[in-house]
Image (cartoon, rainbow, N blue to C red):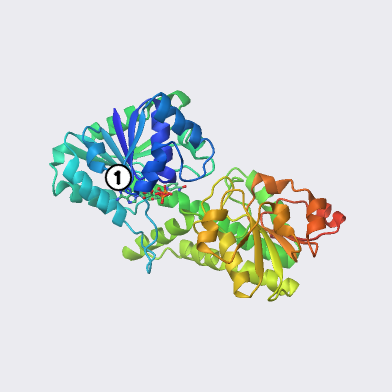
Amino acid sequence: MKLVVVGTGYVGLITGACFAEFGYETVCVDKDKSRIDKLKNAKCPFFEPGIDGLLNKHLNDTKLLSFTPSIAEAVEDANVVFITVGTPTKRLENDADLSAVWDVAVELSKHIKDYCVVVTKSTVPVGTTTKLKKIISKKLDLNKFDVVSNPEFLREGSAINDFMRPDRIVLGTESKKSENIMRELYRPLNLIETPIVSTSIETSEVIKYASNSFLATKIGFINQIADLCEKVGANVQDVAKAMGIDKRIGSKFLHAGPGFGGSCFPKDVKAFVNTAYKHDLDFSILDAVMKSNEVRPTNIAQKIIKLKNFKQGNTIALLGLSFKPNTNDVRDSTSIKIAKEFIKKGIKIQTYDPQGMKSAKSILKELILCNSAYEACRSANCVIIATEWNEFRALDLNKIKEKLKDLVIFDLRNIYNPSELEQIGFEYYGVGK
Ligand SMILES: NC(=O)c1ccc[n+]([C@@H]2O[C@H](COP(=O)([O-])OP(=O)(O)OC[C@H]3O[C@@H](n4cnc5c(N)ncnc54)[C@H](O)[C@@H]3O)[C@@H](O)[C@H]2O)c1
């Protein structure tokens, strides 16, 4: 089988590299020529653990992986084409911007020659894959292609492992032929007994949004419980632990913090609420999740400012800019939203992140970038831990103490033990405790 992956972002590149690892000839396409040039030299345009090794192996050794800016060239003899372009929120609406998907559809309609399965792997609102079929069929006979929905559930930071060992594969198909091709494609995962959920295209599209929205709801829920815990002297970590032991609830996604960010949850919850609205439904639960999450970083920043009476001329050490550890992705990062709030008040932000500094600086030029967590703490009035990178979990606290002007720590990820820090002389604030 020859595969084509259109869009070489976090999802597309991992998909391409992992299918090459399974032994398939895979061509990755991107309209961004500079990205393709980098990839041709095995240079990954973003940070993701393990991707460099796979790129090198399959570009240079097995030669199963190749890159091109041309859809026309790539799809000529393709058996399966994955669409993995971005589907961000539209500028002035909560709707998903599908323009990149439609652009690819038009190109595919012009260049597919023999029968081919066209797969939406991007996260797309229900109805998109069927509309994709309509667009392609304007130029291409219906017997020359099938469309399939195969949403992706990988997480940045552990993307390769997630792709290779997924909890499930969801296949939304409308023909036996395309379903069989997709099952054959994922056969390498049979060995590890990955469940395949075969369903309709519409159901598959809903599964992806329902899954992300549910996880976002768990986070939104525990964050509000954390607020209550702070008021009544309870400890949200103990509450979450005891809740999570209950198998009906589960312990994952019950960590209180500064709110969810990143390139998926915020935009997917918005798009899902918008889909409901278009069908005259009121997704009031998700609406509340979205709204409470939107104000959370600002509220946290304001709370810190009020508590310590921070004003113009003060300096804050902010550790972590990426929306989660092990990625340089700063899209919708709560850390940057918090930083913006301080900067508005004339407070200086000295910051360090192992991977996200360059992209963060391009969004917020006022950030003062530092070479280490310790440098960021120099003469600062407090330190805020905003992203739980491993290297922030075991900081040399005595060194931090030497650097800081005031011994105050806001641990927004609850990674430190308050009593240990208090013993060293820190004034410690966690979330929900
Ligand atoms: N990032 C994640 O963790 C994740 C996880 C699961 C699902 N998803 C979904 O996967 C999709 C892709 O996400 P991402 O984070 O990889 O996006 P991304 O923004 O990192 O990458 C998208 C890529 O598509 C390219 N592109 C855009 N239009 C194109 C066109 N017409 N032709 C060729 N290439 C084009 C862009 O140049 C870019 O390189 C989204 O729908 C997202 O919601 C993302």
The answer to whether the beta carbon of the residue marked 1 is less than 8 Å from any atom of ligand 1 is no
Determine the residue positioned at 41% across, 42% down. Answer: 38
Residue 261 appears in the figure: no
Residue 367 image offset from top left, x and y in percent? 60, 63
Residue 238 image offset from top left, x and y in percent? 72, 52
Neighbours of disc 1 within 10 Å: few (<14), some (14-19), many (20+): many
Amino acid marked by disc 1: Ile
Residue 188 appears in the figure: yes
Q: Quadrant of the N terminus?
A: top left
Q: Is residue 174 left or right of residue 62?
A: left
Looking at the image, is 245 positioned above or below residue 259? above
Determine the residue positioned at 59% across, 74% down. Answer: 344
Q: Quadrant of the C terminus?
A: bottom right
Q: Quadrant of the rendered structure where residue 222 is?
A: bottom right
Q: Is residue 81 left or right of residue 329?
A: left
In the image, 160 versus 357, the foreground residue is: 357
Q: Is residue 52 left or right of residue 276?
A: right
Residue 6 image offset from top left, x and y in percent? 32, 43
Q: Which residue is mark 1?
A: 201
Residue 82 image offset from top left, x and y in percent? 32, 40
Looking at the image, is 355 positioned above or below residue 26? below
Q: Quadrant of the rendered structure where residue 151 is?
A: top left
In the image, 59 versus 288, the foreground residue is: 59
Q: Quadrant of the rendered structure where residue 187 is?
A: top left
Determine the residue positioned at 60% across, 42% down. Answer: 247
Where disc 1 sits, the SS reads helix
Q: Is residue 426 left or right of residue 257?
A: right
